[in-house]
Amino acid sequence: VSIADASPGYPIIQISNSHASASISVHGAQVLSFQPKGEEDLLWVSKTAVFAEGKSVRGGIPICWPWFGTHPDAEMPAHGFARNRFWQLTAVQQDEHGSTEVMLCLEDDEASRLLWPHAFELQLRVSVGKVLSLELTMVNSSKEVVDLTAALHSYFNVGDIAGAAVRGLDGAEYIDALQDSRRFIQLGDVRFDAELDRIYQQTAGDEFIDDDLRGRSIRLQKSGSNSTVVWNPWIAKSSRMDDFEEGGYRRMVCVETGNMGEDVVRLEPDAAHTLGVTISAESARAASV
Ligand code: BG6
């Protein structure tokens, strides 16, 4: 494990063990890469991503918290503030299987209370081994009941979006952000030939990103999550984003494990909730058995 600056003042934790290599930005507690031995990176980061205060890097796994999406008050940041803050690195350790575990924390302070007037503790546990596991524990340290939405906003690397599909959502109801939040039922796999931005509901089971070009499948095993966002900005929307590399929409897809839409987390004082995902690569042949 070593630490290097991505740009001045933006430390990146670099992990390399017998199973995989990975990197995590302390700003946002954002996992930026996960590359099991012999595999291409499972995560996508835009080549034109920027490290800057108050901004989240375009790619990897930004943490959306304590709200997902835009805020009713247009002055407030989209996807909350956790992805725009420096977290504290509290522990790095190796487990008996040779996986590396990293803990990062974020607590309320004056700046967070201006945006969200509640005391909280957030802890992210990242385990890098044959698989990548993330567990985001949110504790309500305030005296009020709070409602939260959140996401592990994961950008996955695909060979070519035209040959990619998201499997495991067949029959799920979704809220379509591109059609006035109307509701539809997913039939079969999710495929991509235009902008797509949906919140799938009641999605506790495993999901797979099938990548025909690479002949692999990325498996997502969720916990504490009953909703999934699938997003690809396609041509027009991605070209409006300065930090989105040209043509990058063809090489990525977001499949976001979270608590979104109707899947709101209500926390009593001192209560906690853990949102988690385990991400692994399988060969397409093994995945289809
Ligand atoms: C997705 C949303 O989760 O995040 C999209 O569903 C949004 O609507 C996208 O455009 C990216 O958001 P941001 O704030 O990182 O540009």
Image (cartoon, helix red, strand yellow):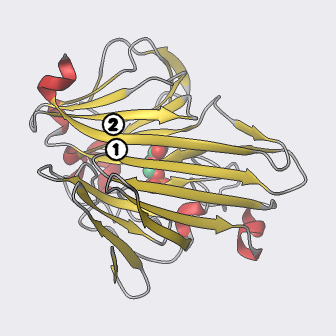
Residue 167 picture quarter: top left
Q: Residue at x 34, y 61 (%)?
A: 32
Q: Quadrant of the N terminus?
A: bottom left
Marks 1,2: beta carbons within 8 A: yes
Decide which of 86, 230 is in the foreground and name it. 86
Above or below: residue 101 compared with residue 285: below
Residue 61 is at least partly visible in this image: no
Report which residue position mark 1 lands on: 233
- Secondary element under disc 2, as helix, strand or loop, is loop
- Secondary element under disc 1, as helix, strand or loop, is loop
The amino acid on which the numbered mark 1 sits, given as a three-letter code, is Pro
Decide which of 118, 136 is in the foreground and name it. 136
Q: Residue at x 81, y 61 (%)?
A: 117
Q: Is residue 276 left or right of residue 159?
A: right
Q: Position of residue 269 (x, y in %)?
A: 85, 48
Disc 1 under 8 Å from ligand 1? The reply is yes
Q: Position of residue 147 (x, y in %)?
A: 76, 42
Q: Position of residue 16 (x, y in %)?
A: 26, 66
Above or below: residue 163 compared with residue 154: above
Q: Residue at x 64, y 58 (%)?
A: 122
Q: Quadrant of the C terminus?
A: top left
Above or below: residue 62 compared with residue 6: above
Decide which of 77, 142 is in the foreground and name it. 142
Report which residue position mark 2 lands on: 195
Circle 1 residues within 10 Å: few <14, some 14–19, many ≥20: many
Residue 222 is at least partly visible in this image: yes
CA gap between label 1 and label 2 equals: 5 Å
The amino acid on which the numbered mark 2 sits, given as a three-letter code, is Glu
Q: Position of residue 228 (x, y in %)?
A: 48, 32
